Image: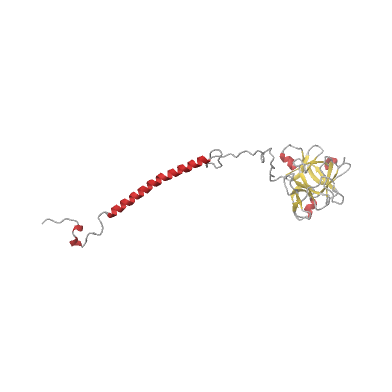
Amino acid sequence: MPEDKSPPSQRPWENGWAPDTSRAPGTRRLWLAGALAISTVVGCVVAITVPHKETDDASARTKSALPGSEATVPGLISFATPSASGSGTPGGTGTPSTTAGSTSATSTPTGPAADGTSPAASAKPAESAGSSGGSPATPAPSAAWTAVRSVNYPDRYWQMSGGLVKLDQVGSPSPRQGAAFRRVDGLADASCYSFATADGGYLRHRDFVLRAEPDDGSSLFRKDATFCPRTSSVASGAVMLEAVNYPGRFLRHKNFQLRLDPYQNSDLYRADATFRLVAGPS
């Protein structure tokens, strides 16, 4: 008798298996094929739509960048229309900003407060004598010979010694050689002072020490040789001299040596940094 080689699925009487007759053959394959077809269609639609949208956006940006339009295409350089007034440019009418380390002629001077507690804004010294009944005005810049006298050592004056400026007693017959200077408008700020020497040099601070040197024509020299008078609370009519390029540092004597030191809230500092500008020999 020939051997039966049919698959087990066709011999349910041997293994108890029976075919599922509740659905048509191949249904799962049809679902998979349909899903694949739908995903393919969706992918094609997206691939067509996105480039078209990007093309429209690029066209819109290009149109907005045409002359007369305010918008610009990202990545392109746009140039602003120059102002007719020229404000804010060199030679224009704009007000230049104040740089660090310098003072403006139109700014309010800063110095020790009247009560001597800390540096504060103070009025600019008057250029002429005050009205009757008022406090003495700060001497105005002039080309006359001027001597600088200490307030707490009234018998001592600024005196040139070996190129440096010290506080010393002035001998007779004339202090012009080393203790008198021509007080002129500040080289870096006309509202401040510069002190010219008899040989044509100027007093300037270098390494924060006051000394006499010839003018080298540099901007640094002009600033180092310019000092702004500030009203002092120590004595009426006396002044403190602040460096124009180091706001907050004043000329003061220490061991009778004239130096440029930061302001200190002490009676000794204010006394050491206060001077009277008196008439020198004619």
Q: Quadrant of the N terminus?
A: bottom left
Q: How is the rendered protein coloured?
A: secondary structure
Which quarter shows the C terminus? Answer: top right
- Give whichever of 282, 213 is nearer the camera: 282
Q: Position of residue 167 (x, y in %)?
A: 81, 47
Residue 162 horizontal/vertical position (percent): 79, 41
- Looking at this rendering, what residue extends furthest in the right direction? 173
Residue 166: x percent and y percent?
80, 45
- Horizontally, residue 67 falls left or right of residue 242, namely left
| Quarter holding residue 196 | top right
Total count of labels? 0
Residue at image position (48%, 41%) is 59
Work out whether residue 139 or residue 222 is closer to the camera in this orientation and state it: 139
For the point 45% across and 43% down, the residue is 54
In the orientation shown, which residue stands out farthest toward the left?
Answer: 1
* 23 in relation to 213, above or below: below
Residue drawn where x is 77% and y is 44% of the image:
227
* Depth order, front residue of 150/164: 150
State whether residue 120 is above or below residue 92. Answer: below
Percent of width and height locating residue 38: 35, 50
Q: Locate residue 236 relative to residue 14 in the image: left or right.
A: right
Q: Residue furthest front?
A: 68
Determine the residue positioned at 21% across, 58% down.
Answer: 9
